[in-house]
Amino acid sequence: MIPANTQIQSFLPLKNVSDQELSFEQHDKSKAKKAAFLSSSAQIWKSRLSWRIAAAVFMTILLVQTMIMNFGTVPTFRQRLLTDLRETNSIAIAAMIDPTAGYNKAPFTREQVERLLNISNVTGLTVYSYQSEPIATFGSAPAMAEKNIRTTGYNRYDSQTGLYELVLNAADLKRPYYIAIKIDASDIQDKVAFFITDTIKIMLTMSLFVTSVLMIALGRWLLEPMLFMRSNLLAAFKSPEEPNIPESPFDTRDEVGSAIELTQKLIHQNADNLTRIKSAAEDKIHKLAYYDTLTGLPNRTLFIQSLNEQARQKQDGTADRFAVVAIDLDHFKDINDSMGHNIGDAILRSVARRLRSAMPESAVVSRSGEDEYAIMMPLSADINTARDVAEKVHHVIRSEPFKVFNEAFQVRASIGVATFPDDAIDPDQVLKNADIALNRAKEEGRDTIKEYSEDFDRAVQARFQMLRDLRDAMEHDQLDLHYQPQLDLKTGKLIGAEALLRWFKPDNSKEGGTFVSPADFIPVAEQSGLIVPIGEWVMRTACENAKGWHDEHGIDIRIAINVSAHQFSQSDICAFTQKTIKDIGIDAHKVELEVTESVFMDDISHTIQTLQNLHAIGVELAIDDFGTGYSSLSYLRQFPIDRLKIDQSFIRNALNDQDDASIARTIIALGRALNLKVIAEGVETIEHEQFLIKEGCDEVQGFRYSRPVPAKDFLAFAKAYNNDLKPLD
Ligand code: C2E
Ligand code: MG
Ligand code: MG
């Protein structure tokens, strides 16, 4: 588009141009034309085409002229000379005739004839009577047959001898005689030869002239336009989008001129099309690179660019503070998994629409991840805190359910906010801070707003440090397993042990290090994926210990291993468990996996499948911390569960909080109804124990019997324990 316009504009008449400028322009133009002509005339002599045409024309002219000369001009010229000779001599002889002379004697005297022979080319003559009888002969006279004498206008030219014989009759002489004359016409050959050379010279000059004129005409009217057209095409070929082609100086009324005009139009059209296609492609690339295809909102890249722009304006002193809001839809994955991607996509689009229309023009609303959105909004007198923006967003999403395919979906969102420049002067950092606040909102139970605080950042830093230390701990064998006994409440027997991870982190203190609580490092391990190798190590170690106690000390107990929800989604826990059991040679029924209710929040069909597969191996399954999560009675029936583990908080409070006591009681009843074993954890006192015995709980675990202890201490406990539910000293 650009080059074409530029080209056209440069040909438009310029306004406000002075006469002087115009005359300069014209002068320049004529100079340019002259230069073009000179260069093209130089080109003519180099042009093969011109040379070929010229040679063809030259040869044709030459050929035609040679033919004309051979078949017409030369014989005619010779004939004309002979006719002249005949006429001149006929007049001279007729003038000599004496009209009074008799018809049977020569009509002139010998002296007269000799004078004629002296002054003319006539070499001799014979006079015949009207009856063709010779009357008199003078000089070297021709001997004529009678039939030639009587032939009107008889003549014969012998080019070998140069002799010309002819007969004059009564019509030529106005008297009744025949006179045969012999003339020496040898100079005729010379004249003809001279005529031929002259004609050839003229022919050559003419041919040269015609050819030159033709060459110039060809150059001017054909070659020059063709070269111009070729240079146009070359320019278009070199830079098709911006062809630098000058205005055509050729008259568009003739064929070549109009062909050039068409070519130029075509070149411009092509340039236009290319530019249009290119800019359309660039638009498309830009859209793909900077916009989200599902919602049409700017993507994270464009959002970050907008943030930078907004922050740059701020340094110029022209922009205000702005808020960055990071939004994550709560449990969107569940909707996607259970209702299908069509519904999920429709909800994402609706949320985008709702957010966009609720925010002012000045706000940038973007989709920054699968179910994540980010908003940048300049703060104003009306909305002057980031929290106001966040609350508006929260309200917009929650205000009414989203209707998709005639179904209503209540969507909730976790929201994190940060303010520029209050929370960071680097726009990227503002976004990171909003994300940190968002994570905090998710951790604190979702469906909530969190404003960024530096403490969050410190917590994040601490987590990073923890992650680094945890990796280190794995490499340097700082992880260990402690075991806590599980007892049968009715018989008092030791029936199992729960394996609990311990991390003794060495430091420079007097004690040589500190224990890091699993409650602190397990979430970090889960988020980073480290939980998979750690979990595998735990399972192997716990199974090895249990197998050792059984084989070497006859302690036949079940080993309970904690498995987090992430291990379900991030690894093939089933295959690993099967392999470990087989490798170690432990009875599968002696292995129990403790899962929390959070596994039921993830991909449900995958969870069902995994639990069924694990059960098929023979492994027992317990639901840990039962009663604290999203309890759903339906999954208790669907899943192959063996044991419910009442969360320790209910036990702790059972004696002084009626609600917690009721929950504990209900869980025990539920277990009984569903034919599941119920184990209580966190049993610290004899009162707890008595409450559980009264309620009919099956099994117990807690500090009352033993804290979690190292493997060798557990072995000592197991050996010393005498089935009386009494704590050991
Ligand atoms: P959990 O599985 O519910 O483990 C029981 C927790 O209660 C243990 O805490 C245990 O020391 C503590 N406990 C036991 N009896 C009593 C008692 O009478 N009173 C009190 N106050 N506490 C008692 P611990 O060892 O700190 O573990 C915390 C959590 O860390 C565990 O909760 C479990 O969710 C997780 N965890 C521990 N080891 C592992 C592991 O190997 N893998 C995974 N994924 N998680 C683990
Ligand atoms: Mg547990
Ligand atoms: Mg527990």
Image (tube, rainbow, N blue to C red):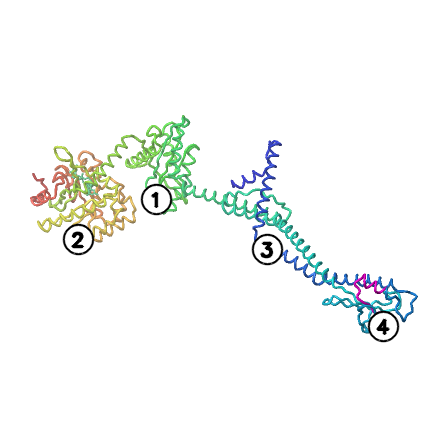
* Structural distance between the alpha carbons of marks 2 and 3: 95 Å
**Is the shortest distance between ligand 1 and the CB of mark 3 under 8 Å?**
no
Tag nearer the camera, 2 or 3: 3
Whether pointer 4 and pointer 1 mark residues with C-beta atoms closer than 8 Å, the reply is no
Instruction: From the viewer's side, name the closer residue of 172 and 111.
Output: 111
Image coordinates of residue 497 in percent, x first then y, are: 14, 45
Q: Which residue is mark 2?
A: 583
User: Regarding mark 3 in the picture, which secondary structure is present there?
Assistant: helix
Q: Which mark is residue 52?
A: 3
Tag nearer the camera, 1 or 2: 2
Q: Residue at x 23, y 45 (%)?
A: 532
Whether 123 is among the magenta residues is yes
For marks 4 and 2 on the same chain, the one whose residue lies earlier in the sequence:
4
Q: Which residue is mark 1?
A: 335
Whether pointer 1 and pointer 2 mark residues with C-beta atoms closer than 8 Å, the reply is no
Image quadrant where residue 623 sits: top left
- What type is the residue that disc 3 sits on? Arg
* Structural distance between the alpha carbons of marks 1 and 2: 40 Å
- What type is the residue that disc 1 sits on? Ile
Q: Which residues are magenta?
A: 112-126
Q: Crowdedness of circle 4 by 10 Å Cα count: few (<14), some, many (20+)? A: many
